[in-house]
Amino acid sequence: MPEGTTGPGTTEQQLNTEVVLGRVINTVNDVIPWGPGGHMEAGGGGSGGHFKLSLAELDALVAQWTVIRNKIDTSGTKLERAIHDVSPPADDEMSEMEANATRDSLQKAVDHNVAMRDYAQSYIDKLTDARNRYENTEGHNTSTVRASDGA
């Protein structure tokens, strides 16, 4: 294995990753309208190989990603609460070690949750910026056309 890389992790880590990934995929699939071929249905494609979205479609995408971000926030709150609720089942060293291992695992889930939230927020910010630039361009073009017609 190349220096600086890690292996796939323990079986338990791999299973936990798959469970979390499955939940993320299910959440995204519940919120985003995927088409028959597994592609997002967001608007018609333009000629010449470019893609067009209307302001309404961009607004809908921002709303959908906001729902995703909010679900991520809710999960993060539950994970944080779970960390604080963990207590050893008995008053012995092994029980304390198990509780610490559970807290460590939950903290990794929190860290992943934060990364997912940051990604979702970044996507919302990019969509909002694209929407605003598109609206400004359309407004400018409309004004230019009206001015050229003498209106």
Image (cartoon, rainbow, N blue to C red):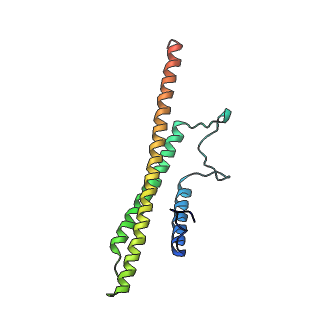
Q: Return the residue nearer the eye: 58 or 150.
A: 58
Height in image: 138 above or below 18? above
Q: From the top left corner, tell me how far across and down residue 100 is, in percent.
A: 37, 76
Question: Which residue reaches farthest top?
Answer: 150
Please say if 61 is above or below 25: above
Q: Is residue 13 left or right of residue 83?
A: right
Residue at 52%, 61% (x, y): give it. 24
Q: Is residue 89 visible?
A: no
**Residue 48: percent from left, percent from top:** 67, 32
Residue 94 falls in which quadrant of the image? Answer: bottom left
Camera-nearest residue between 29 and 82:
82
* Location of residue 1 by image quarter: bottom right
Q: How many marks?
A: 0
Is there any visible trace of residue 24 in the rendered image?
yes
Residue 114 lies, with reference to residue 11, above or below; the image says: above
Write the residue at 50% across / 32% down.
134
Residue 50 at x, y percent in the picture: 63, 36
Tell me the residue at 51%/41% (across/down).
58
